[in-house]
Each structure stands twice: as structure tokens, then as C-alpha cells.
Image (tube, rainbow, N blue to C red):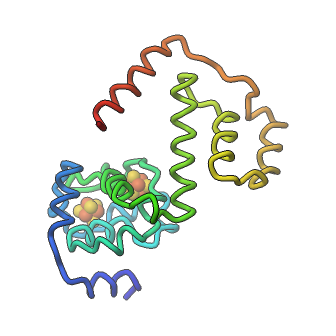
Amino acid sequence: MSVAEREIQAVAPSFSLLKLVERKTGLSISRCFQCQKCTNGCPVSDTMELKTHEVVRLVQLGARERLLSANSPWLCISCRTCEARCPNDIDSSRIMETLRSLVEPAHRTKQAHRVESFHAAFLGTVRQMGRAYELGLIGLYKVKTGTYSQDLKLGLAMFQRRKLKVLPERVRRLKEIRGIFRRAEARKG
Ligand code: SF4
Ligand code: SF4
């Protein structure tokens, strides 16, 4: 039995977290019967402390503290392979997203801060240019995280192979893309 399986067995069930996550995601998480198809298709499963099916089970059981301290929600890349494979149409990326939102900023780990900074930098460049601009993304990410020397060699190699463009490319319908961002922000409240 794995460590996570032992942890799951020791949980005293409570249903408030399940209700909250079901309301926020609109998913019927209680329908999960632990077939593990989500975990078996997840491309980042090996790096997660709690595998996708274990996250779903712990949400059912209401193990809030354990879930909010795990690295799994921060490592999910929202590829939605889990949803495509799930016989109960459970989109675990939405569960992961909801769990991320429940972690108070002051309790976020360095890794969580870096993931958030990456997302913010990526979306920031898309909002400004209408599409991803890798050099701008790298600059914003490094300023936010202070990781100036990390991956320097890799960055130089990519630059030499012309994988990183110096100037950004703008798209023609930039106004429409910025409108999408505004509508998303309005929906978030
Ligand atoms: S694939 Fe769906 S039903 Fe199976 S364990 Fe994952 S969430 Fe549960
Ligand atoms: S959406 Fe997240 S949890 Fe689902 S398969 Fe992709 S990385 Fe794994």
C-alpha cells in the first residue's frame, strides 16, 4: 500500500469540501468510483505527491489540509486528458484549479509561487501582444521570481538556434483578445 493510500484510509470523512468543490466546478465528483483512468493518462502524474484519482478521493472525503499542502494542484498543466478518459466526465483540471484558489497567498510554497508567476507572465504577454512572446514571458517570470541565473545556458542555446524571437509579433485582432480578458475578469468578479 502506498503512503497516499494509507493517508486516504486514515481520513475521517467530512462533506463540506466536496460540496464546495462541486459547487465551484459544477462537477459530480461524488460519482468517481476510483477506476484510476485519469491518473494513468496524466502526463505529470510521476511528479505529483497525490495522483489525480487520489486528489478526487480526498476531495470526496474532505481532507482539506492534505489537499491544500500537496504539490499536485500546482503541477497540473490543464491538458484535460483526465476528463477525456473519465467514464464519469470528471474534469480534474477544474478540481485542481479550485484547490489552487483555496490556498491562501501567505501559505503558498515557493514552487506554487513560481507556477503562479509563470501563468501570470504568460497571460500578461498574450494580453499585450495577442499571442505568446517567449522572451517577454521569460523576463516577466524572472522579475517576479528572482530566478535570474536559472536555465541561463538553456536560454542562450535556444536563442542561438533562433527559438526565441527578439521582437514580439502582434496579431491583427488584438482588441478582440483584450476583450476576452476583460470578460473573463468581469466573470471572476
Ligand atoms: S477517471 Fe474519473 S472515475 Fe476514474 S478515478 Fe479518475 S475521476 Fe474517478
Ligand atoms: S488536466 Fe491536470 S490532472 Fe488532468 S491529466 Fe492533465 S495534468 Fe493531469
Quarter of the figure with the C terminus = top left
Residue at 20% in and 83% down: 12
- Residue 42: x and y, percent? 43, 59
Q: Nearer the viewer, residue 162 or 68?
A: 68
The residue at the point 36 percent across, 64 percent down is 52
Q: At 50% across and 68% down in the image, what residue appears? A: 46
Extreme residue in the front direction: 106
Where does residue 40 sit, x and y in percent of width and height?
A: 39, 64
Is residue 164 positioned above or below 85 on the image? above
Q: Is 7 above or below relative to 53? A: below
Q: Nearer the viewer, residue 110 or 52?
A: 110
Query: Residue shown at 40%/72% (left/top)?
Result: 50
Q: Quadrant of ligand 1?
A: bottom left
* Number of dots carrying numbers: 0
- Is residue 42 visible in the rendered image? The answer is no
Q: Indicate the quadrant containing the N terminus: top left, top right, bottom left or bottom right.
A: bottom left
Where 134 sits versus 59, above or below? above
Quarter-of-image position of residue 125? top right
Whether residue 7 is visible here, answered yes or no, is: yes
On screen, residue 39 above or below 3: above
Q: Which x, y percent locates residue 114?
A: 57, 55
Please indicate whether residue 171 sits to the left or right of residue 181 in the image. Answer: right
State left or right for residue 21 relative to residue 79.
Answer: left
Residue 154 percent coordinates (x, y): 78, 49
Judged left or right of residue 88, residue 135 is right
Residue found at the far top of this picture: 172
